[in-house]
Image: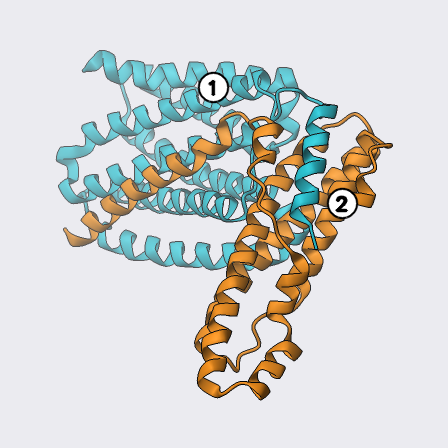
Chain colours: A orange, B cyan
Amino acid sequence: MTIALIFIFLGLLALALTVYLAKGHLSKGGDLEKLAIQLRPVDVGAFCNLISASEQQYLREHLPPREFRSIHRERMGAAVEYVRCAAHNASILMRLGDAARQHSDSSVRQAGEKLLENGLRLRLYAIQVIPRLYLSMAFPKARPTPDILADTYDNMSRQVATLSCLHFPTHGMSSAL
Amino acid sequence: MLFASYYLWIAPHILLGIFLICLLGRGLHRQLPIFFSYVVFELLQFIVLFSIFLHSPFQADIYKWTLVVGEGAGSILELGVIYELANELLLARSSLGSILRPALRVVLALLLLSAAVGSGAFSGISVQRVNNIFEMINFSSNLLEAGMVLALFIFARALRVSWHSWVAGVALGFGVSASIDLVTAALRAQWGERAFSAVDLTQMAAFHVCVVIWLVSLFLTNRNPPFPDGKLKISDLELWDQELQRMVQR
């Protein structure tokens, strides 16, 4: 009886979750204008500073332990927010990349493909990095995260610029980045 | 009741036939060849079972064993389709393949373990051996299928991978049908032969829903491109330009 009930419950849960998760995939992609205003500002330099090992070492050496732990927690909390924003932006840029993949111009398609690939990579890193940042919050001696996330984010931003340039070459976007 | 059971047996297969014609017409069968084989197999199985059913005198044993063999072969094909869906939707992307493949293997191993536990518990629901074999295959394949489809959707959500193609509809159809079948298989195991006809009707209704989802997703994909404009407009790009300047400020 108990095993049957467990599987009935699991089946109903799987049904509800599958329908809920699939809803987004079958609806329309939405327009780019609405997606663009959902982007959140991310200062990659500030993020690199927050997770920098040398910066952490400097603070450890110059602050009393208690104060260091408190500041470290705040810094890691801020870093988590940065990662969340970067992951959020990545999901939006992946949709731009997805749209670009259907373009008639092969160079645009290629740029879109790269953007999508980097977006995916960044989201994967974000999933791995956030628990490590929380771990570092609890145990300040733990090395929070490699700089690879910031590099991927930078790469992705450059690819968006490339993509836009391919569509509209004289727009001066590269200089803005 | 009789009309309902005939309807639920025949109508989904007619719709499946239409779906197959649409697939062939658009050349989409090349995108998911195992799924295409599965659809053909389902139709063939229906034709064979229906012919046996119409044959006079009705030979129950032949019918049941054909059903069991068909269920076994269908389950193998369904697992193949799940692999194909995983490949098409997630694993084909180079950055994801290396990380998600082991994760999916772990999910599959856990599901296999659960299926073994469930099959062991439900192994004696009927005095007839053929019914027990059918029940175990049916339960295990539905558990694996529902679990794997759900895992795919969870991974896609976590990584924000968007599936705009009809393939997402195929996954959804399988997920819905397998989840309902899992619930009903557990109910059948609990109540035994008393619940057989109600469970059969529910499973046929679930398959009907599944085929309707496939058909609708095929037509929706055709009608709604991922981005309505098709091409990015200059105004869109200007907006991206401004947003990017804000986003990567240093």
Number of marks in picture: 2
Residue under circle 1? B216
Seen at 62% across and 26% down, the residue is B29
* Three-letter amino acid code of the residue under disc 2: Gln
* Three-letter amino acid code of the residue under disc 1: Val
Residue A26: percent from left, percent from top? 49, 28
Left-right relation of B133 to A36: left
Observer-nearest of A171 and A130: A171
Crowd around label 2: few <14 · some 14–19 · many ≥20 (10 Å) = many
* Residue B36 visible from this viewpoint: no
Residue under circle 2? A159
Residue B120: percent from left, percent from top? 26, 55
Seen at 55% across and 27% down, the residue is A30
Quick one: SS at disc 2? Answer: helix
* Residue A40 visible from this viewpoint: yes
Q: What's the CA distance linking mark 1 and mark 2?
A: 35 Å
Observer-nearest of B22 and A58: A58
